[in-house]
Image (spheres, grey):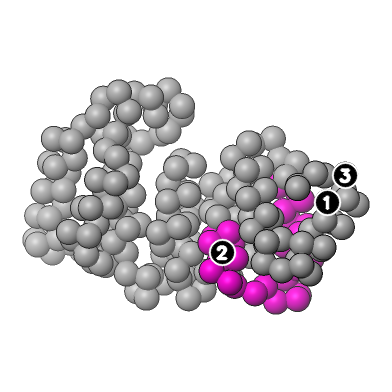
């Protein structure tokens, strides 16, 4: 994508604004926890949400922001990307480039969970070899289940199988995402709850 002068100008303004809002304590704490960005200004999510409202949905600006290896730029990109304009290819690209658990959670709840093909990528991503993509997959499913999404019968077995594998993963973040997702699924109906209870019992896992 070639940025127009207007998009480039807005991007510069946004980055200058981030500098003014820098929270060194938060930024340092994130670095200590392994959150890896070229730049991290430590700007709060509520402030980023307000900025997203100010700029509105903006496809070229979202693409430009995502290209920046800056925490705040990537988060803002997920907030202003128009859901109906995001292609499957771009979703796959962004999903594969997520550098942190925080961004995996935010992108799933602000963006990926609203896409017309959300259930398709969730189904594929929970089996991904990329940890952040896998976390996204479970969070997307969690949002869908909370909104009343009904999983098709043919997806039950692979969903449960991939979730069980994730629950035994060494990564606590993957375990947590899978656990929350399975709970959301179980809460949908008595039938789902029975399926989960039986599956966990057969695999010597405690969910409830």
What residue span does the magenta drawing correspond to? 140-166
Residue 12's disc is none
**Could you tell me which residue is drawn at 79 percent across and 58 percent down?**
196
Q: Is residue 8 left or right of residue 49?
A: left
Does the segment drawn in magenta span residue 143?
A: yes
Q: CA distance from mark 1 to mark 2?
A: 21 Å
Q: State the CA–CA distance, disc 1 to disc 3.
A: 6 Å
Query: CB atoms at circles 1 and 2 under 8 Å apart?
Result: no
Picture layout, residue 170 above or below residue 128: above
Residue count near mark 1 (Cα–Cα under 10 Å), binned few <14, some 14–19, many ≥20: some
Residue 17 coordinates in the image, percent (x, y): 14, 42
Q: Is residue 48 left or right of residue 150?
A: left
Q: Is 35 on the left-hand or right-hand side of 72?
A: right
Is 190 located above or below residue 116 in the figure? above
Spot occupied by residue 10 in the image (x, y as percentages of width and height): 12, 55
Q: Main secondary structure of the magenta part?
A: helix
Which residue is labeled 3 in the image?
A: 204
Quarter in which the N terminus is drawn: bottom left
Q: Label 1, on which residue?
A: 200
- Do the residues bearing badges 1 and 3 touch, measured as CB atoms within 8 Å? no
The structure residue drawn at horizontal position 22% and vertical position 60%, both measured from the top left corner, is: 53
* Badge 3 density bin: few <14, some 14–19, many ≥20, Cα 10 Å: few
Q: Give the residue at mark 2.
A: 146
Secondary element type, mark 2: helix
Residue drawn at (76%, 75%) of the image: 154
User: Based on the displayed image, in which of its 4 quarters is residue 56 positioned?
Assistant: bottom left
């Amino acid at each position: 994508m070639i940025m127009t002068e207007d998009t480039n100008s807005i991007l510069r303004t946004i980055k200058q604004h981030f500098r003014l809002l820098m929270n060194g304590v938060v930024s340092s704490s994130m670095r200590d926890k392994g959150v890896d960005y070229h730049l991290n200004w430590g700007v709060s999510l509520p402030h980023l949400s307000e900025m997203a409202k100010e700029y509105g949905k903006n496809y070229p600006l979202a693409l430009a922001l995502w290209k920046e290896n800056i925490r705040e730029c990537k988060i803002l990109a997920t907030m202003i990307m128009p859901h109906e304009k995001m292609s499957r290819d771009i979703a796959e690209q962004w999903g594969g480039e997520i550098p942190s658990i925080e961004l995996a959670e935010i992108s799933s709840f602000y963006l990926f969970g609203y896409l017309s093909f959300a259930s398709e990528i969730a189904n594929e991503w929970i089996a991904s070899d990329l940890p952040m993509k896998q976390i996204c997959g479970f969070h997307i499913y969690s949002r869908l289940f909370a909104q009343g999404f009904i999983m098709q019968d043919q997806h039950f077995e692979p969903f449960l199988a991939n979730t069980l594998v994730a629950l035994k993963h060494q990564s606590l973040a993957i375990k947590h995402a899978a656990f929350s997702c399975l709970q959301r699924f179980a809460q949908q109906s008595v039938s789902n709850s029975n399926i989960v209870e039986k599956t966990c019992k057969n695999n010597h896992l405690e969910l409830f």
